[in-house]
Image (tube, rainbow, N blue to C red):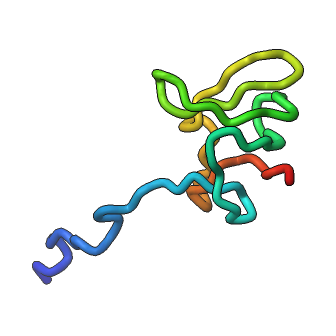
Amino acid sequence: MLKWFRKNGSRRSGSKLRMADLDGNVLNEGDMVESLRYNLGECKLLKTDNGYEYESVSTGEKVSWSKMVDAATENQKVRKIE
């Protein structure tokens, strides 16, 4: 009965968010993507002093990569344009 209250170290220990789009394609600095949030449209992935950001090509608006994480898959809520 006390085993219910033990910490399970295997759950999420050391899990890291991947820089990958919804399809699992790895994202790198300079990649062009289609944003599926915030109506950014086509964006470029940039590395700034604040970390990675998506900059909209049409409006110039910037959004932090952490705001684009899809909770279900832990991937970015973008699609890579090839």
* Observer-nearest of 36 and 52: 52
Location of residue 40 in the rendering, given as x and y in whole percent from the top left corner: 81, 28
Give the residue at x 76% y 36%.
37
Q: Is residue 18 left or right of residue 12?
A: right
* Observer-nearest of 1 and 30: 30
Q: Quadrant of the N terminus?
A: bottom left
**Residue 27 versus residue 42 in the image, above or below:** below
Location of residue 67 in the rendering, given as x and y in whole percent from the top left corner: 59, 35
Q: Is residue 14 left or right of residue 19?
A: left
Location of residue 20 in the rendering, given as x and y in whole percent from the top left corner: 63, 56
**Residue 45 versus residue 69 in the image, above or below:** above
Give the residue at x 31% y 62%.
14
Which residue in the rendered view is the most extreme toward the left?
Answer: 2
Give the residue at x 77% y 29%.
38
Location of residue 62 in the rendering, given as x and y in whole percent from the top left corner: 68, 21
**Numbered-mark total:** 0
Q: Quadrant of the C terminus?
A: bottom right
* Observer-nearest of 70 and 46: 46
**Residue 64 versus residue 30 in the image, above or below:** above
Q: Which quadrant would residue 43 be assigned to in this image?
A: top right
**Residue 40 versus residue 35 in the image, above or below:** above
Q: Is residue 41 left or right of residue 2?
A: right
Give the residue at x 74% y 17%.
61
* Observer-nearest of 6 and 81: 81
